[in-house]
Image: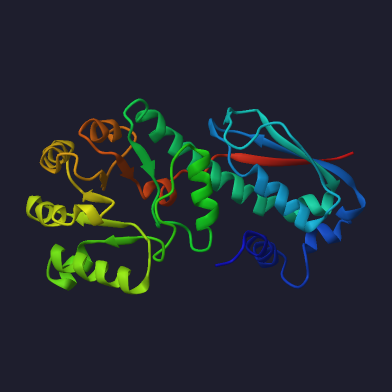
Amino acid sequence: MLDLDTLLSQALAEDLGSRGDITSLAIGAGNYPAVGRCIVKDTGVLAGVKWAQKVYSIIDTSVSLEIHKSDGEACRPGEIAFEVYCNAYTLLVGERLVLNLLQRLSGIATLTRAYVEALAGTGCEILDTRKTTPLWRTLEKWAVTIGGGKNHRFGLFDQFLIKDNHIDLCGGVRQAIERVLAYRSAQGLEAPIVVEVRNLREIHEALGYAEHLDRLLLDNLTPEQVARAVEYIGGRLPVEVSGGITPKNARAYAEAGARYISAGSLTHSARALDISLKIRRL
């Protein structure tokens, strides 16, 4: 897994190639002291200022950044997120990567905040998933936390998630759970175990192993179906729900008894916030 310094450096290298910013070089942008003003043009939750600062420091350690809006703050059109002082070449080289980060991550934080507000007072938490942009997972999951959400498993290595395909391959819920328990014991692992269940029969089988499990995942059910399942489970395990859940219907699932809602839309469908960077000579 790439560390973020390496990831950001490689993202800059993708843009610069072996020749650098030939347009900015042609106009002698490096000779101009300048300020870049990051202007928010949307309503939402700001996320990515710390990474913008990191990008510019990778390009030029002498960069000075004056922050006006911090990560996690609500923002409105016309507000200035930050001002960055350096030569114009540095500003132009970092501009696109900085805006890509800010727009994408702010979009994720904004959508996450909408779920958090919809669930306020219910005790239900919103979780992200692995439906992330390749190699941007750390950044995107960070943006979820900025919006007030919680992180689900990071990858395939830190949680046992027994899903429908695993169950079908093993021939049933009981068989899949027993294989996972045997493997976890043999490997000396402490990773949590979550089991996806599709009907009351599978719930019944999974509850036979309740002392070894961390929660049950109900996928693609209506709030009414979730309420019936939660009643049957009777508090023996926490319930996570997923599948087609939006900020508009999330509260209904929480009130049906869900302790967690996982939504891939947080990272695969968030609309980027409109943010720009305007540069002027000093």
Residue ID at (52%, 45%)? 143
Residue that protrudes farthest toward the right in the picture: 31
Please determine whether, in this image, residue 202 is positioned above or below residue 115. Answer: below
Residue at 78% of width from left, 57% of height from top?
59
Q: Which residue is found at the position 25% from the left and 43% from the top?
A: 238
Q: How is the image coloured?
A: rainbow
* Percent x, y of residue 54: 71, 51
**The C terminus sits in image quarter:** top right
Coordinates of residue 139 in the picture (x, y in percent):
55, 53
Name the residue located 29 percent from the left edge and 41 percent from the top edge. Answer: 245
Specify whether 101 is left or right of 224.
Answer: right
Answer with the quarter of the image where residue 119 lies: top left
Eyeballing the image, is 258 above or below 27? above
Q: Is residue 266 above or below residue 114?
A: below
Q: Looking at this view, name the residue that lies furthest to the left.
A: 201
Q: Give the x, y percent position of residue 30.
A: 88, 55
Quarter in which the N terminus is drawn: bottom right
Number of numbered tags placed on the structure image: 0
Instruction: Please tell me which residue lies in front, 82 or 158.
Output: 158
Query: Residue 96 at x, y = what percent?
Result: 66, 52
* Left or right: where 42 falls relative to 127: right
Q: What is the quadrant of residue 201 in the picture?
A: bottom left
